[in-house]
Amino acid sequence: MAVRTWKLIDQRVGAEAAPAQLVIGERDFPGLGKAAVIKRTYSGGLTEGVVGVEISNGEVEIDVLPTRGMGIWRVLHRTDGSDNVATVGWKSPNRGPVHPAFVDLGEPSGMGWLDGFDELLCRCGLESNGAPDFDDQTNRLKYPLHGRIANRPAHDVELTIDTDKQEISLRGIVEETRFHFLKLRMTSTITTKFGKKSFTVSDEVENFSASPATMQMLYHVNFGLPLLDAGSRVVAPVKTIVPRNPRAASGIKTWDSFSAPEPGFEEQVYFFELNAAVDGGTRAMLKNAHGTRGVSLLFNKQQLPYFTLWKNTTAEADGYVTGLEPGTNFPNPRSFETVKRRVVELAAGQKQRFDVTMQIHTNGPEVAAAEAMVAKVQAGRQPQVFEQPRADWCA
């Protein structure tokens, strides 16, 4: 069997360190063909010390950041019928990828997470995943914006290539722990097949404490130009939609469409329950105005029962972006979601798995086929649209 594994990051004392720069291609491992993997360590500015792993399956390149919680910085792919390269992701004002050492999650406003935010896919969690949460009596920060996991570095990172299965996988372990408090371990595996325009993120979260724990998870998946543009649309099998606040309510009639960059645009957020197939499978897609490019997210409501749409179509220089966000809950403050019982309960030693697949559509027929799959899940059911926030959904 043509399988080989490389240890890219090894935390063991005395273990031999992998090179800061590593290139694996056909010459190093026959059978790879056009596929290749590059490990690099960034230097300069806020990127100093960030380890990145670029996984190319011959069709797409997936740039993974073990230093930033196994997040995915961006995806590059060839445009249909040419060798031109397009980027799936967005342009953040932060000059990233930003090393977590430069992100102060505990600063008093609770908004420090934004100092490092520039990935295509970053996780929010694990103790909390929503808005900053403050103690009612002291007004001290209890839980920072979107939690800590995206700024925790991975250890024991392994790359496995299987030329028989035509598969590349990257596995890393990220822990969110505090003595006397939470003890959660996330084992993340990112897998892609040779020549496919897709990849899957599979995360297993374990409570390795001897005591019970609760957790939250949200996949903050972010798109900007050129996929997001004036006239782009979200296509999803909506069961229920609720605007988060009056600002979102003002745009409820056009929740699924986007405008051109608008300086000073105030974000709009919508909360959803989606329809799903019998097995819980569901999906959502963002497509461009002409229906010639798109990206779909596939996930399961049994793992990730809630969905959030974040619209932030401000000026390009300020971060023109939208977020499609499957999660275990809505990204309200942790205290509110706990009262509403939208937390995952884990007994001592218990594990919970989450899977998200991203499919990239590079032409009109692929976009149309993905839209047909959404319609199949929707099955002709009409969505329930609330024009104002609901007290049980919105903090």
Image: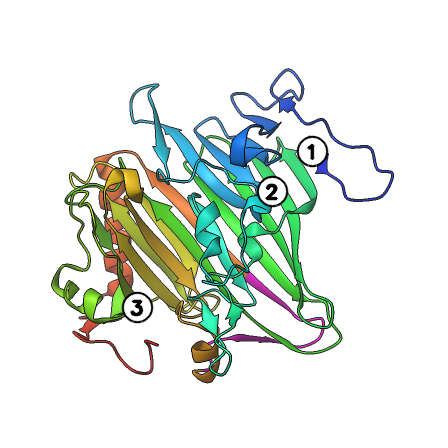
- Tell which residue pokes out farthest to the left in this image: 253
**Which residue does the numbered mark 2 point to in the structure image?**
66
The reply to whether the C-beta atoms of the residues labelled 3 and 1 are less than 8 Å apart is: no
Foreground: disc 3 or disc 1:
3
Kind of residue at disc 3: Phe
Local secondary structure at mark 2: helix
Question: Which amino acid lies under the numbered mark 2 shown in the image of this protein?
Answer: Pro
User: What residue is shown at x 71% (from left), y 71% (from top)?
Assistant: 349
| Residue 209 against residue 46 in the figure, above or below | below
What's the mark number on residue 272?
A: 3
Q: Under tag 1, what secondary structure?
A: strand
Q: What element carries label 3?
A: strand
Residue 303 location in percent, x, y? 48, 66
Q: Which residue lies furthest to the right in this view?
A: 14
Residue 307, label in figure: none
Q: Where is residue 115 drawn, in percent x and y? A: 46, 48
Q: Position of residue 76 (x, y in %)?
A: 41, 31
Question: In the rendered view of the protein, which quadrant contains the C terminus?
Answer: bottom left
Q: Which numbered circle lies on residue 3?
A: 1
Residue 79: quarter of image: top left
Disc 1 residue type?
Val
Relative vertical location of residue 298 with respect to residue 272 in this rendering, above or below: above
* Image height of 250 relative to 92, above or below: below
Is residue 274 at all visible to an observer of this figure? no
Q: Nearer the viewer, mark 2 or mark 1?
A: 2
**Percent position (x, y) of residue 321?**
30, 46
Magenta span: 341-353
| Label 2 environment density (alpha carbons within 10 Å; few <14, some 14–19, many ≥20) | many
Residue closer to the observer: 161 or 153: 153
